[in-house]
């Protein structure tokens, strides 16, 4: 099981979610990137794993409206486009950080 980040900071002005895991540099992930990778059933077809959400359709001024811890394994992110069903596990966030770093 992936470790929880030691720190999560929402930088609303920059539209960046800053995730820090112990002993590593902070990862700075743009909101639009994270929103585009939403793992919920509305954004991804549960059966085929195909992404339904078109990243181009995400508004430019996307902002976080809520961050709610779920158990000790995930965080639920609520966005200003009214979407709040995305549950991001620590493992998923780590993968997103790696994916973004490799882009
Ligand atoms: Zn979603």
Image (cartoon, rainbow, N blue to C red):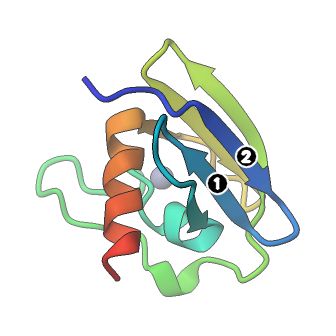
Circles 1 and 2 in contact, beta carbons < 8 Å? yes
Q: CA distance from mark 1 to mark 2?
A: 5 Å
| Residue position marked by numbered label 1 in the rendering | 18
Q: Residue furthest right?
A: 13
Q: Is residue 74 left or right of residue 46?
A: right
Can residue 52 be seen by looking at this rendering? no
Label 1 lies in ligand 1 vicinity (Cβ under 8 Å)? no
Q: Residue furthest front?
A: 23
Residue in the foreground of this view, choosing between 30 and 64: 30
Q: Which quarter of the picture shows residue 16?
A: bottom right
The correct choice, above or below, for 84 with respect to 73 in the image is below
| Residue position marked by numbered label 2 in the rendering | 9
Q: How far from the left and from the top, in percent, is residue 87?
A: 47, 36
Total labels: the figure holds: 2
Q: Which quarter of the picture shows residue 61?
A: bottom right
Q: Which quarter of the picture shows residue 18?
A: bottom right
Rendered residue at 67%/27% (across/down): 68
Q: Residue furthest bottom?
A: 56
Residue in the foreground of this view, choosing between 5 and 51: 5
The C terminus sits in image quarter? bottom left
- Mark 1 packing: few (<14 Cα in 10 Å), some, or many (20+)? some
Q: How far from the left and from the top, in percent, is residue 82?
A: 72, 53
């Amino acid at each position: 099981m992936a470790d929880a980040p030691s720190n999560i900071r929402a930088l609303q002005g920059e539209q960046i979610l800053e995730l820090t895991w112990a002993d590593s540099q902070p990862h700075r992930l743009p909101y639009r990137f994270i929103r585009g990778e939403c793992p919920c059933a509305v954004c991804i077809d549960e059966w085929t794993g195909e992404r339904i959400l078109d990243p181009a359709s995400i508004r430019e001024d996307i902002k976080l409206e809520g961050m709610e811890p779920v158990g000790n394994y995930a965080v639920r992110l609520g966005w200003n486009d009214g979407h709040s069903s995305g549950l991001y596990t620590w493992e998923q966030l780590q993968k997103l950080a790696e994916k973004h770093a490799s882009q």
